[in-house]
Image (cartoon, rainbow, N blue to C red):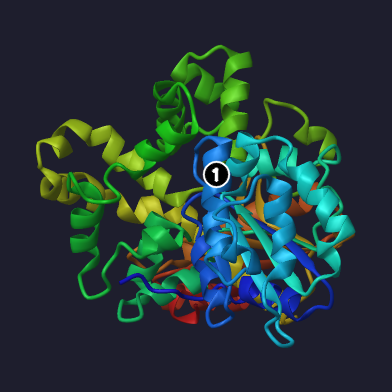
Amino acid sequence: MNKFIARKNELDFLEQKYESKNGQLVIIYGRRRIGKTETIKHFCKDKGAIFFTCTQTEDNNQLRNFSSILLSNNLPQSKYISEFNSWEQAFLAIKDFPKLEEKKQIIVIDEFPYMVKGNSEIPSVLQKLWDAELKNQNIMLILCGSAMSYIEKEILSEKNPLYGRATGIYKMLPMSFADASLFFPNWSKKDRVIAYSILGGIPYYLNQFDSAKTLKENICSNILQKGSILYSEPEFLIRQELREPATYNTIIQAIATGKTSFNDIQNTTLIEKGKLSVYLKNLIELGLLTREFPVLSTEKEKQNIQRGIYKLHDLFFRFWYRFVFSNYSALEFGDYENIYDVIVEPQLNNFVSFPFEDICIEWLRSKNKKRELPFVFTKIGRWWSKDLEIDIIATNEDKSEILSAECKFHNTAINDSDLQKHLNKNISLLKKKDNAVIHIWYFSWSGYTTQAREFAKENNITLIEGKDF
C-alpha cells in the first residue's frame, strides 16, 4: 500500500485557496511521478470533490467522458440528458451542483493538457465562462498536468485566454531529504541518505522501497532485477515523452558518468553542437536535467553556452543510467546480485557524495530560515573557477560575508590534513574576494579525528557531522 507522506506546503496552499472567498481557479503542475494526483486526492478527502482524469483521446470522446462524470454527481440535468452537447454546456453546468452549505464545490481536471490538445478552443471557452459566471460561484476548479513545458509555454503564457484568470499557480517539486527520509523510519540515517541519493524526492519511487527490507534487498529486487517496477522506469518515461530515445539515452548516460560540461558531453556523444543544445534544453524542460553555474556567476556569464555544468536533476535517473543502463546485458541475464556486489556497492559512497552536498545545502537553508547561522544568506550553491572548487558557498546580498563549506560522505573520520586543504582553499578564495568575511565550515558524515577537532578549534572552523542531521 502506498504511503502518503509530507507535502505540507502543497496542502496548506490548497487549503488556503479552499477557504478563500469567491471562485478559485488553481493550476497545479509538475513532472510525472512527482505526486500531484495523490496530493490533490489527499486534499480533497471528505470534501465531496469531483475528479476527472483526461486521456489521450478524440475530443468528442473526452467530452462524453467528462459529461458522464459530471452527470453522475447529482446535477439536475442528469434527469433529462445523458451527455452535454458542447464544452460550454459542460463547464457552465458546474455552477448547478447542489450547494454544499458554506463549503466550496471542488472540481479537479487531471492531465488538463490532454483536454486542450484535443480541442484548442477549450481555454477560450473556459475563460469566457469564468469571467461571466464561474468566478462568482462558490467553486474551486483545479487544473492539473504533467506536461510542464506545455503548461508553462501555452496554458500560462500571455497569449493564452486563461492568462491572468488563475487565482493560484503551484509547481510541485521533488521532496526534500527531510521529507523523503520519512518513508524509511526504521533505517539508519546513513541508509536514508543513500536511499534518497538513489531515488531522489519522487514519492512514486520512494514508495517502491520496503523499509522492512535492507537497502541491498531493495536495490536488488526493486531496481536491478528484471521485471521490477523501477527496472525500466526511466526508459519508459523517455520513450513516452521524447522522440529519438536512443539519442537521449546517450546524452543522459554521458552526464550520469561524469561528463557534465557542454564540451565533454559533445565530445563523448559526438552530437552536433546545435542539435545537442536543443536536446539538453528538452531534458531541462522535462525536469530531468538542470544547468548549474557557480553561485556567484553574473547573468552575462550564464548566457555563455560553454559555461556551467549539466547535472541530472532526477537522482533516480542518475543511478539508473550509471548502474542499470551501463550493465543491461548482465541484468537481462538475471545477474543482479553480482552487479550489486561487484559494481554498485563499491561505488556507493562516491555516488552519494554529490547528492550529499545537496542535503547539506538543504540543512543550511533550514538553519538560515530560522536565522541560526552567522548571517542571513540570499544565495547558496556550488562554486568553482579554473583553479579552485568549493562544495558550498553561501553569501549575503552584498557579498560582504561568505560561508564556505566542504562536504565529505566517507566511512572514515576526517583528519587535520583534510581540514588544512579546505583552509588553503579559503585563503585562495579570500584573495579573490577582497574585504569579505569568510566563515569556514566542514560537513563530514563519519565525524572527525581528535587532531581534526583541535585544528578546527585553533582555526575557527565549524564542524558538522552525520549525527547533527
**Residue 443 x/y as whole percent:** 52, 68
**Residue 442 x/y as whole percent:** 56, 67
Taking the image as shown, residue 182 lies to the left or right of residue 93, namely left
Quadrant including the N terminus: bottom left
Query: Against 95, is 101 above or below?
Result: below
Q: Which residue is mark 1?
A: 62
Viewer-proximal residue, 128 or 250?
A: 128
Viewer-proximal residue, 153 or 44?
A: 44
Question: Label 1 amino acid?
Answer: Gln
Q: Residue at x 51, y 14 (%)?
A: 271
The answer to whether any part of residue 149 appears in the image is yes
Viewer-proximal residue, 16 or 335?
A: 16
Occupied quadrant, residue 421: bottom right
**Residue 270 x/y as whole percent:** 48, 13
How many numbered discs, if any?
1
**Label 1 secondary element:** helix
> Given the current orientation, which residue lies at the most extreme bottom position?
101
Q: Dot 1: within a 10 Å radius of its alpha carbon, few (fewer than 14), some, or many (20 or more) residues?
A: many
Q: Residue at x 62, y 75 (%)?
A: 11
**Residue 111 x/y as whole percent:** 56, 49
The answer to whether any part of residue 433 appears in the image is no
Q: Residue at x 50, y 50 (%)?
A: 32
Occupied quadrant, residue 349: bottom left
Taking the image as shown, residue 372 lies to the left or right of residue 288, namely right
Taking the image as shown, residue 222 lies to the left or right of residue 250, namely left
Query: Against 337, is 259 above or below?
Result: above
Query: Against 222, is 256 above or below?
Result: above
Viewer-proximal residue, 44 or 376?
A: 44
Q: Residue at x 31, y 77 (%)?
A: 187
